[in-house]
Amino acid sequence: MHILFPSFADALREPDPEFWRERDALDSLGLPWRLFAFEALLDGDLEKAFRYLVPGKGETLVYRGWILKESEHALLQAQLASRGYRLWVETPTYAETQYLPLYFERIRELTPPTIWTNRT
C-alpha cells in the first residue's frame, strides 16, 4: 500500500508542503508514497497530472490530499487504474463520506436535527 499526495505546484516531484511532515514520517519508516499534480488534474491536463507517477503493478493507493468533487475523484480513480493502481476508497464511498446528504441516514440518530438545502 502506498500513500498518494498532491504535488507542490512549483515542484512536481515533491508533495505539497502541507504534507511534508507525513512524507518525512513515511520515509523514516521506509514506507512508499507517490505523487500527482493536483492542479493539472483539475485543469484536465492528465499528461502533466501523472508525469512523475511511475507505472503501477496493482498497488493500492491511499489518497491523502485536498478534498475532491465526486467527478474529480472519479477521474482520479480512472486515471490511476489506467496506470496500474487501485484507490483504496472508491468514488461512491468517497462521495458518501464527503457530502452529508449522502451519509445522513447512517448518522441521523446520532446528530441534532439537521436541515440543508439543494442549490445549484
Image (spheres, grey):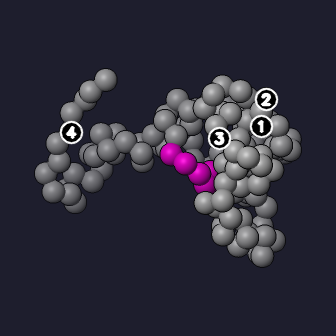
Q: Which residue is drawn at 68% across and 64% down?
A: 20
Cα separation between marks 4 and 1: 37 Å
> What is the distance, in whole Å, between disc 4 and disc 2 at their CAs?
38 Å
Identify the residue under disc 1: 50
Q: Residue tagged by mark 2? A: 47
The residue to which callout 4 is attached is 116
Q: Which of disc 3 and disc 2 is earlier in sequence?
A: 3
Magenta span = 61-67
Where, quadrant-wise, is the C terminus in this rendering? top left
Residue 6 lies, in percent from the top left, at 66, 48
Tell me residue 8's x, y (percent): 70, 50
Disc 3 residue type?
Phe
> Are circles 2 and 3 on residues that touch, CB within 8 Å?
no
Q: Is 34 on the left or on the right of 120, as rendered?
A: right
Q: What residue type is labelled 4?
A: Trp
The residues bearing labels 3 and 1 have C-alpha atoms spaced at a distance of 9 Å
Q: Of label 3 and label 1, which has the lower sequence position?
A: 3
> Residue 72 or 95: which is nearer the viewer?
72
Which residue is nearer to you in this view: 23 or 107? 23
Residue situated furthest front in the rendering: 10
Q: Mark 3 points at which residue?
A: 38
**Dot 2 amino acid type:** Glu
Task: Assign a secondary structure to mark 3.
Answer: helix
Verify CB contact (< 8 Å) between mark 1 and mark 2: yes
User: What is the distance, in whole Å, between disc 3 and disc 4 at their CAs?
Assistant: 29 Å
